[in-house]
Amino acid sequence: MKQLPFRQRDNQITLQLLDEDDTPWISALIDELEAAVGRPWRELLERIERLPVRAVAARRAALIDALRKWLGGREEGALKAAVVRRHLLGRSAVDPPARADRVQQAASTLGVDVGALEAALWADLPGERLVVLREPRPSPLALAAAANLAIIQSALMRCHGVRLRMTGNARAIVRTAVIRGLIATARRRGDHVEVDLSGPLSLFHRTTVYGRALGSIVPHLAWCESFTLDARCDFGRGQGTLRLQPPVLLPPSSPPQRFDSKLEVRFVKEMAKLAPQWRVLREPTPIDAGTQLAFPDFMLQHREMPDLQWWVEIVGYWRSEYLAAKLATYRAARLPNVVLCIDANRAVDNADLPRDARIVRFEKHVPIDQVLALIEPARATAYEPPRSPADPSGNDRERQLPDVATDL
């Protein structure tokens, strides 16, 4: 894990992010970049090391990483290093004449001169790649914003949990968290929305994957009217709370998209094809359940009977207690007609599912016939869902709440 630029006093952690005051030394670094075009990256890094810059090493490293990503960081040139090595390496050349002869033979085979061959031999290594400037000179603020994003995302890789308080764009952030496989719980706090997100260190399962998922939320914060992010982290000096709030220099992000995944697009298309009698409303109004909020993905409204409505939520990462809490939220909102579609491949345990839930399992796409079997009684006779492992006989079905059914 890369070193982070931060300060910690007691249990309060502050990231040392970049801002407008850093533009002079960033501009000097870009000057060196332009002077090193066509030279190996190791030479550019040596020049940067000699700059009289009073910047924390971790901040400078973050900026260099942002610069590499901005430039592309790929091997350039007509000759590829792997191809050169296939022609040149193999049996050992123990003396200079033998080596020179082999280099000449490989250069002739590839149709290049000896100097180009030597330069391309290790050109795929990070330090030997040529510095290439494809676009106009980058903006110092744009590089600083990209470096800040990388620093924040790296910090969230080491957190146990995140609490976000925001106004505006709450739905997009909750939706991004769910699509990325995180657990998100939202509630209303006055004129703010408060969202709790599980951090990678609290899951003990594929922490890198979930850390990256958590970091993907950061660009969406730019679309919030206001926000405060508190994360419980451990950067090697004991646990503390990292707080992030405006003003923060971040890269501009794209506006929230209508659909967050191909899974949702396919669901809408298949519903329109197989069940035209149902109107599919994307991202209906958030459901107020007292102090909490629910963000269903879709509302299904019967075209001939508008009062007949169902809410559908597609769940990625899940645990049984998470589904139980989500169902409790919908009950508090007095919404019994809820279908949860859960990803069968992303469960982290084998605990029994809540028995008072209408649940449809899916892998690559949501089976529309199973959804319709739950929301249309006439179809239910043609589709018999599998019984719950905890209730193989089905005898407990009669003891469930009358307004909620079970399909497992």
Image (cartoon, rainbow, N blue to C red):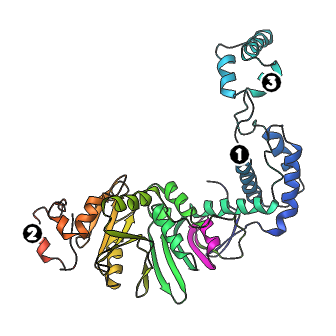
Is residue 76 part of the magenta span, yes or no?
no
Q: Say whether residue 328 is visible.
A: yes
Q: Which residues are magenta?
A: 219-240
From the viewer's perspective, is residue 32 above or below residue 298? Answer: above
Residue located at (59% from left, 75% from top): 229
C-alpha distance separating marks 2 and 3: 78 Å
Q: Name the one closer to the observer, 16 or 213.
A: 213
Q: Nearer the viewer, residue 170 or 53?
A: 170
**What residue is rendered at 51% in x and 80% in y?**
194
- Please name the amino acid that badge 3 sits on: Ala
Please name the residue shown 21% across and 72% down the image.
405
Q: CA distance from mark 3 to mark 1?
A: 22 Å
Look at mark 1 in the image and give the residue it sits on.
Answer: 72
**30 left or right of 71?**
right
Q: For the residues marked 1 and 2, what is the alpha-carbon distance in whole angstroms?
A: 61 Å
User: Label 1: how many residues lie within 10 Å, few (<14), some (14-19) or many (20+)?
Assistant: few
In the rendered view, would you say 297 is above or below 4?
A: below
Q: Earlier in the sequence, mark 2 or mark 3?
A: 3
To which quarter of the image does residue 151 belong? bottom right
Q: Quadrant of the rendered structure where residue 90 is?
A: top right
Image x and y of residue 66, in percent: 72, 54
Q: Earlier in the sequence, mark 3 or mark 1?
A: 1
Mark 3 surroundings: few (<14), some (14-19) or many (≥20) residues within 10 A: few
User: In the rendered image, is residue 198 in sight?
Assistant: no
Q: Residues within 10 Å of mark 2 (few under 14, many from 20)?
A: few
With 187 as the anchor, is 330 left or right in this view? left
Residue 395 position within the rendered picture, expressed as x and y whole percent measured from the top left:
9, 69
Circle 2 SS class: helix
Disc 3 designates what residue? 116
